[in-house]
Amino acid sequence: MIPILRRELIEQLRTNKAVLLQILISMIFAILIIARWPTDSQSDLSGLASRQVLRLFGYGLLTVIALLVPSFPATTIIREKIKGTLALLFNSPIRPTGIYAGKFFGVFLIVLILLSTSLPAAGACFAMGGISLTGEIIPLYLILITASIQFIILGLVVSTYANSTDSALRMTYGLVLLITILVLGPYQLFQSESGTLKDISGWLRCVSPIPATMEVLGQKDIGLSGFTLSYSAINRYFILTGISCMVMVYLTLSRLNYRIFDRSRSAGVITDDRTKGAKRFRFIFYLIDPQKRSKGIGNWTNPIMIKEFRCRRFGRSHWLLRLVALCIIISILLTYSATTGSISWGVEAIGGLMVLLQVSLLVLITPSLSAGLISSEIESNGWQLLQTTPLSALKILRGKLMSVAWTLSMILCATLPGYLIILYLKPEMQPQIVNVLICLVIAAIFAILVSAFISSLFSQTAAATTTAYIVLLSLFGGTMLFWLGRGAPFGHEIVENILLFNPMAAALHASGTSGFEEYQLIPGNWYIMGLVCSALFLGLVYRTWKLSRPR
Amino acid sequence: MNQDEPVIVLQDLTKIYGEFVALDHLSFTVRRGQILGFIGHNGAGKTTAIKIMVGLSKPTSGTVSIAGIDCVKDSHKIKRAVGFMPDTFGIYDNMRVREYLDFFGAAFSIEVKKRKKRIEEVMETAGVTYMQDKYVESLSHGMKQRVAIARTLLHDPSVLILDEPANGLDPKARIEMREIILRLAEMGKTIIVTSHILPELSRICNQVAILHRGQLKAFGPLNKIMKHLTQLRTVEVQLASAKQLKAAALIIKNMRMNKGNINVAPKELMIRFKTEKNDQELSLVLGKLIHEGIHVSQFRELQADLEAAFMSVVKGPKKDKAVSEVGE
């Protein structure tokens, strides 16, 4: 175990990325404390100011962990598998448990180092007064450490099942989003009910570290529509994380042997070679038969676009159909259950929830589609092959962007039925809904362009995907931290100026969601995003042109 | 097009990265239907030269033209004239072989109906028809190389540039690859092949270019190059009995036939030595051995191979003249 641990840890610590991260995290939290450090001679015995800082500090650290930690373990095993060094490790006397422990502690120690850079800021927070060390700061750090362990173990299990570094990253970030944010959803719907559904959704929400963090920071009942919790989210979080981690460790260890290299992929029986009856049956069953020989790419179709669709695991037409159907069902179910529930949320709240759902989908899906557009070609040497064809840089770029735009627009359109129901319930909301849709389209365009631009800067898809996720999550989620700190420590103007860069906040403002009405974000956000998108597009065109030139 | 008409013309091709000279005034001509073996150790400049030829890189100075098209000024036109197979495959996951070829056919703007027919043809030529429904990522290395050949042929280029086509292939796949390349030459394609497996190249190439540290050290027909470069002949003498080995070696030594050590291999009953002497002088040795009662079962000269020629170029500075001696 020790050689692996040493290698993993030292290899990571030697990188510029690790040094930069440590400096960045220390600086961010130092600035936060400096901004709120009391300047008058009277001390605040109630601890209001320090508690406000601690909340921002706590949520900020949790966000940093959720954004950064998964990228380390998600690629560690798959990268070794691709390089061939994993086979060498299996040939060494180190047992799978030793390999696993080395990998785990290699990442965990880095996370501890990163967390320790926030300790001076936590100390300063404590020195401001009104905060308990044993009641708040230590439990907060325990939760953060547990969340880190949860994400590391999750990343490792995904890394053993994935076939490429970028798919490992996509899957890990998707699961992190699921276990931190999406699991909170069902309880929002069933909190007013009584019985099994409420109990299950109550336990489910505790899989996420957010309720436990909120409880430590004294905000356990916020967002629960007036209901109070009768259980400790912290205890449930520790129990659930413990159980899930044990399962994930078992799954990872069971894959850490030579079976991990098996990647047989049967071509299956091609429908064209089947009988007429079987062909008909499959047509009815599938609509679009995945085993049917594809027709040639049309004379007027951009071949790059078709290639992109075909190369994606879930990009083929039959998968897109299933995805669109699922989005329609979720959208209608969400609207239906919210409107028929015993609590009257109001269409604005439902609209807000739908915006969150759509932006979550955008943030989750777009980097996975767009961040590998160019970097994956460079990484797999496909770019060189494309350069040997008569395809121009613009045609390549157009095909690639269109492949993402089509997928996203299909997914976004599939979530539209919910808005139709809102329109039916409250027809006067039509202008607001149009504004929301404009914001969502802008958010989608921005997400595509920023991910694609990042993709053109990297030669490794894993790095491009991680960067795209961090940029998008920082913009869509990180700026919301300022909104959470509205009133204190951040004034109205600062929050408004920050939110002007967030199309999701603009959409929430347009839908009239509570807490966003007081900020004037439209049309300012549209202008800013329009400018940013134009700059990104020009940058992307330039980078693609440059990459396709003879060097 | 005339058979003797030059198809690939390199003139004073130079590429400099910072202070590193990757290509140093490279000049040669390849005629239609010829197979040129492009040889050089790692970093010799082969891939740099190839990349310039296919329009992926720009030279610092000099010109390259293929089928009359300037590879630097008309890099977009050259793509239709040349079929390039790089040393890496360029995998697209989740694509079946037929879809993979269809994509590249579409990228070359081949019309759908014509493309379908062309795909059948190139699959037949490269021997990949039976794997048309297989996923590209699940293919073995040898299969991928054949698919790559099929991809290279899609737009029916007159010139093929194959970078390490036999690299990593097993003997059977190597033989199949050799047959494919010879078949393509029969079809009138002009081919440039690079390889580290020199015996493989010697079997298919009729022209050879040896590159060393960016300089062309030798160029010309294979047999001429070997004659010029391998100046020492290797002679093998096999005896009927091991007892006479020592005596035979002594006779050869006394006649001062050898240049360097005389190698005696008792298990093989063999004596090997290198010599500068001609056939007439060597026949004297055989006569002397027989006269002295040595039972010679074989007396032969080992054919110099491409590997030996290459090594003599790389090692010996005096072989620099070979270009002017052998080249056209």
Image (cartoon, rainbow, N blue to C red):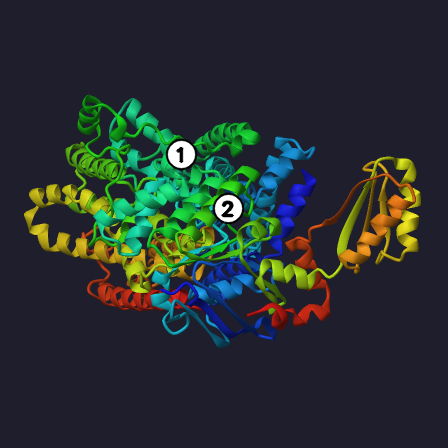
In the picture, the quarter occupied by the N terminus of chain A is: top right
Q: Which residue is mark 2?
A: B178
Residues B295 and A471: in front is B295
> Which of A414/A499 is in front?
A414
Q: Is residue A493 left or right of residue B282?
A: left
Label 1 resides on the chain identified as A
Residue A20 position, x and y percent, is: 54, 60
Q: Which residue is mark 1?
A: A206
Asked whether B15 or A20 is in front, the reply is B15
Estimate how packed mark 2 is, as few (under 14), some (14 to 19) or many (20 or more) residues with alpha carbons within 10 Å: some
Amino acid on which the number 2 mark rests in the picture: Arg
Residue B168 visible in this rendered orientation of the protein: yes
- Calculate the distance from the C-alpha at mark 1 to the C-alpha at mark 2: 64 Å
Which amino acid lies under the numbered mark 1 shown in the image of this protein?
Cys
Q: Secondary structure at mark 2?
A: helix
Task: Please determine whether, in this image, residue A482 is positioned above or below residue A423.
Answer: below
Number of numbered discs overlaid on the protein picture = 2
Q: Are marks 1 and 2 on the same chain?
A: no
Please give the name of the residue rendered at 55% of the width and 46% of the height, measured from the top-left corner. A133
| Mark 1 vs mark 2: in front | 2
- For numbered disc 1, what is the local secondary structure? loop
Q: Is residue A121 above or below residue A306?
A: below
Relative side of A354 to B319, left or right = left
Q: Position of residue A358 (x, y in %)?
A: 25, 46
